[in-house]
Amino acid sequence: MKKIAVLTSGGDAPGMNAAIRAVTRGALARGWEVFGVRNGYAGLLEDRLDPLAARNVGGILQSGGTVLGSARCPEFKEQSGRERALSNLKKRKIDALVVIGGNGSQSGSASLDREGFTVVGVPSTIDNDLYGNDVSIGCDTAINITLEAIDRLRTTASSHHRAFAVETMGRDCGYIGLMAGIAGGAEVIALPEVEITPAQIAERLREAYRRGKTHALAVIAEGAKCGVHELMAYYGAHRKSIGFDLRVTRLGHVVRGGIPSAADRVLATRLGAAAVATLASGARGVLVGIVKGDVITTPLAEITGRTRPADASMLELARVMAI
Ligand code: F6P
């Protein structure tokens, strides 16, 4: 291995910069050359690669987002797009690529692997929905941002004897909502993994009111079938019988924009270094991940088309704790 390139792709996630730094410095320490690709796969198509030296990745550990830029790139899904990307990589004599990103990005890695190019994936998505990995880079920070919002909302909810519904991101995975809901003592948590109706959510808020609580919090994961709109519509018709007034806060991209937590920086550093070590060992076409505390690799072909759902059995814990 002589020359590698690194890119960040898909939705940005806090800790991506720590991963770029780890890949770059881990590779430079082995005497390799490193190139940073601008704006994800789009940069491969446009041949936007710049050399990365140790100083180029200094002072970025604590920054959210990605200094390389990111993008969702539909052209890369086409054979012609991939051919252009591969020809640019060959022209520059790049031996291998490290892809830092979530599910969509790792499908891209898998397609490069199928075309015979050496690639290693690093799991980075606030959604934490990648198969073959317990915790993705960015999700700890996203949980903490959601939790901070829940804690703040509880203050005003309690003063005004209100219920709040907080919607957090996560696409089709409820991990952020589940963890932040448990940490924030939510009365009810709605996840994409488990069907819950607006009436059932409202009932949990009603029970909280009857038990004499000063406030109630519902955490709604973005992909839940009962979203905040459905809940508001139900509330409109049943407000009187529920007790609490309802206010809704949708956190949206705020969840993604934080300063990476210590846990995300350490995770990104471990996984970035592991990606380089994997390439050095001669392995290819794998995702590096942490399972039960250990760094492991899983073939990209195995993770494609699979996701890792949130552990919905923990909802019962949240329910008991909200009595
Ligand atoms: O995958 C990360 C994520 O933030 C999801 O939680 C969310 O559904 C999606 O990206 C939003 O995508 P975009 O930034 O393209 O609007």
Image (cartoon, rainbow, N blue to C red):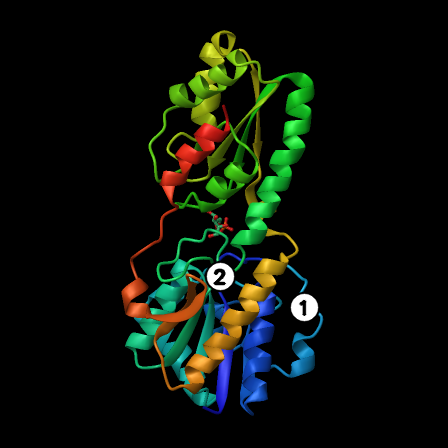
Looking at the image, residue 5 sits to the left or right of residue 145; the answer is left
Corner quadrant of residue 68: bottom right
**Quadrant holding the N terminus:** bottom left
Identity of the residue drawn at 52% across and 76% down: 273
Identity of the residue drawn at 44% across and 29% down: 319
Identity of the residue drawn at 34% across and 76% down: 285
| Location of residue 232 in the rendering, given as x and y in whole percent from the top left corner | 48, 21
Identity of the residue drawn at 49% across and 88% down: 3
| Location of residue 142 in the rendering, given as x and y in whole percent from the top left corner | 56, 49
Question: At numbered mark 2, what does the secondary structure look like: helix, strand or loop?
Answer: loop
In the displayed image of the protein, which residue is found farthest to the top?
A: 240
The amino acid on which the numbered mark 2 sits, given as a three-letter code, is Ser
Looking at the image, residue 58 sits to the left or right of residue 90; the answer is right
Q: Find disc 2 in the rendering and name its residue.
A: 124
Tell me which numbered mark, 2 or 1, is placed earlier along the sequence: 1
Residue 33 in sight in this render: yes
The amino acid on which the numbered mark 1 sits, given as a three-letter code, is Ile
Q: Residues within 10 Å of mark 2 (few under 14, many from 20)?
A: many
Give the distance between the C-alpha atoms of the residues marked 2 and 1, in whole angstroms.
16 Å
| Location of residue 320 in the rendering, given as x and y in whole percent from the top left corner | 45, 29
Q: Does label 2 point to a residue whose CB lies under 8 Å from ligand 1?
A: no
Looking at the rendered structure, which numbered label has been put on residue 75? none
Number of marks = 2
Question: At numbered mark 1, what does the secondary structure look like: helix, strand or loop?
Answer: loop
Looking at the rendered structure, which numbered label has been put on residue 60? 1
Corner quadrant of residue 13: bottom right
Looking at the image, residue 38 sits to the left or right of residue 290; the answer is right
Residue 68 in sight in this render: no
